[in-house]
Image (cartoon, rainbow, N blue to C red):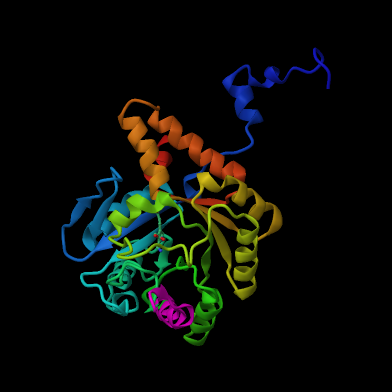
Amino acid sequence: MAFPTHRLRRLRATAALRSLRRETRLDPAQFILPLFVVAGEGVRKEIGAMPGNYQLSIDQLVKDCAELVRLGIGGVILFGIPAEKDELASGAYDEQGIVQQAVRALKREHPKLLVMTDVCNCEYTSHGHCGFIVNGDVANDPTLEWLAKTAVSHARAGADIVAPSDMMDGRVAAIRAALDSAGFAMTPILSYAAKYATVFYGPFREAAESAPQFGDRRSYQMDPANSREAMLEIELDLEEGADMVMVKPAMPCLDIIRMTRDRFDAPVGAYQVSGEFSMIQAAARNGWLDGPRAMMESLTAIRRAGADFVLTYFAVPAAKLL
Ligand code: PBG
């Protein structure tokens, strides 16, 4: 491979050559847009730390999703902000809950749009933790029952995929069993398998009104210092019946995405989380970065690392550039 016989710059000389050489491409069908649903009508409340993202009432949500279908975006993932929160996360598994209603409305108006639901409790508990509290910490096993009920209610409403994000041990098996016995053997589970306790969820907690009222999530979400533990999480979730797995956050975890891709053959998703979005937006608004280029490069890097699809708040602007 000696110079001057070999010159790698030859294939970088023109746009056409670079395009032929390109290893990773983006397609709107690989983007999943997270959306926040609230009660009421005509509600469209911008999220302070996430410019261009809104808490939407169902009518507005349905309206916005028409554009996603037009752009060929892969789907949406819904997060619900209930009118009332309680200790038992009742709103999470209520058949008339906010997400259940939103799914029914979306599937009615846009039957071809893929609708995923986030299965978790933190938006629904008065204390903001992801499960049932015993002695100041989330109790694993009682929480599984809530998650299973929630997943079944989402499937019954018409969700195409349920995505548990709570990080309880055994939740995938519990959800699979509950779905199967309720007649939803064909509803796939996308597990947030390697989900880290990261600072980059900060803006989301404003969006979903789900900041924990005491303590933090480090007794259930993973330590950002670990990678082998992530492989164990993924292996167990696949054994329990996960159809697809996710790594979250994305840019701080490109190594984890790559390890996952190399070790497992299941589809791998990555979640470019709120803080990743907000950092790029903030720098762009300050004129410190070229926003559209930073957006496209970040998505390309996540795909290059091995993600098959990306949950991203950039889904619409990125699709428009493609
Ligand atoms: C619910 C959940 C969170 C996110 C997705 N699902 C918040 C958390 O775990 O605190 C974060 C997504 C984002 O930051 O964009 N448990």
Q: Is residue 185 left or right of residue 153?
A: right
Observer-nearest of 135 and 157: 135
Residue 309: x and y in percent read 53, 51
Identify the residue at horizontal 74%, vertical 17% (top origin): 7
State the image coordinates of residue 88 (x, y, percent, origin top left): 32, 80
Answer with the quarter of the image where residue 13 lies: top right
Evaluate whether residue 315 shows in this view: no
Up the image or down, 136 lies above or below 275; here it is below
Main secondary structure of the magenta stretch: helix
Q: Is residue 251 magenta?
A: no
Looking at the image, in which quadrant does ligand 1 appear?
bottom left
Residue 144, image x, y percentages:
46, 79
From where the camera sits, is residue 242 visible?
A: yes
Is residue 309 found left or right of 273 in the rendered image?
right
Quick check: is 137 in the magenta stretch?
yes
Q: Is residue 288 above or below residue 322?
A: above
Residue 244: x and y, percent? 57, 63
Magenta span: 135-152
Q: Quadrant of the N terminus?
A: top right
The residue closer to the viewer here, 52 or 120, is 120
Question: Of all residues shown, which one is farthest toward the top?
Answer: 4
**Residue displayed at 50% across by 78% down:** 175
